[in-house]
Image: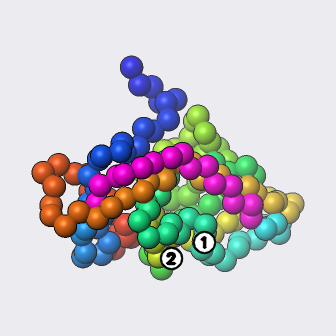
């Protein structure tokens, strides 16, 4: 029986996916998959300061791939705000500034919040890091999930899982 400590299974080879970006929807099948564990070592953030939003360019998959992130683990006492795409608040952080963020207490490999973020070509996330501590911090951010090889299907399959890659306003 699955528990809250189990890792996400993700999509299986042969699963069908509908990827919706804005008003466009295309259908794909998963032809391969592997684990994804990406470490992003951020620059030092000065005491009690806020870094500007920066794109996580290594989470911009090439054509024919889909990245699915289910955990973001922060090593460092900072707050992480996320936008996807870069100009859109996927988690609505500007609408509710007290929510929509991750920190070292709400992230982690076995505990913390689960995410369900998918990235395709030209849609990587942008993050902003906030240091509220009286000392400089150099955080490490781990993105944990799956990397899929996908092929487009020209006709709508009978069964599929829809993924929306856009902000809350779209």
Q: Is residue 117 visible?
A: no
* Residue occupying the point 61% across, 49% down: 37
Percent position of residue 59, x then y: 56, 65
Q: Is residue 141 magenta?
A: no
Q: How many marks?
A: 2
Q: Is residue 32 magenta?
A: yes
Which of the 4 image quadrants contains residue 46?
Answer: bottom right
Can you say whether 49 is above or below 157 in the image? below
Say few, some or many: other residues with alpha carbon within 10 Å of mark 1 (under 14 / 14 to 19 / 20 or more): few
Q: Main secondary structure of the magenta part?
A: strand
Say few, some or many: other residues with alpha carbon within 10 Å of mark 2 (under 14 / 14 to 19 / 20 or more): some
Q: Nearer the viewer, residue 133 or 16?
A: 16
Residue marked by disc 1:
57
Q: Is residue 54 visible?
A: yes
Percent position of residue 167, x then y: 38, 70
* Residue occupying the point 60% across, 71% down: 57
Q: Which residues are magenta?
A: 28-42
**Can you say which quadrant of the picture contains the N terminus?**
top left
Residue marked by disc 2:
86
* Residue occupying the point 56% across, 40% down: 112
Q: Nearer the viewer, residue 56 or 89?
A: 56
Could you tell which of marks 2 and 1 lies nearer the N-terminus? 1
* Residue found at the very far right of the displayed protein: 135
């Amino acid at each position: 029986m699955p528990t809250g400590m189990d890792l996400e299974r993700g999509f299986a080879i042969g699963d069908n996916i509908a990827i919706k970006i804005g008003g466009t929807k295309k259908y794909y099948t998963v032809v391969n998959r592997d684990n994804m564990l990406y470490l992003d070592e951020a620059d030092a953030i000065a005491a009690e300061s806020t870094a500007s939003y920066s794109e996580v360019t290594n989470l911009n998959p090439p054509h024919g791939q889909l990245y699915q992130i289910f955990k973001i683990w922060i090593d460092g006492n900072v707050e992480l705000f996320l936008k996807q795409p870069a100009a859109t608040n996927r988690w609505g952080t500007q609408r509710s500034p007290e929510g929509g963020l991750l920190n070292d207490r709400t992230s982690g490999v076995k505990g913390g919040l689960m995410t369900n973020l998918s990235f395709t070509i030209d849609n990587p996330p942008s993050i902003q890091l906030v240091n509220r501590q009286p000392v400089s911090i150099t955080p490490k951010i781990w993105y944990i999930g799956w990397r899929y090889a996908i092929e487009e299907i020209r006709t709508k399959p009978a069964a599929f899982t829809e993924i929306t890659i856009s902000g809350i306003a779209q």
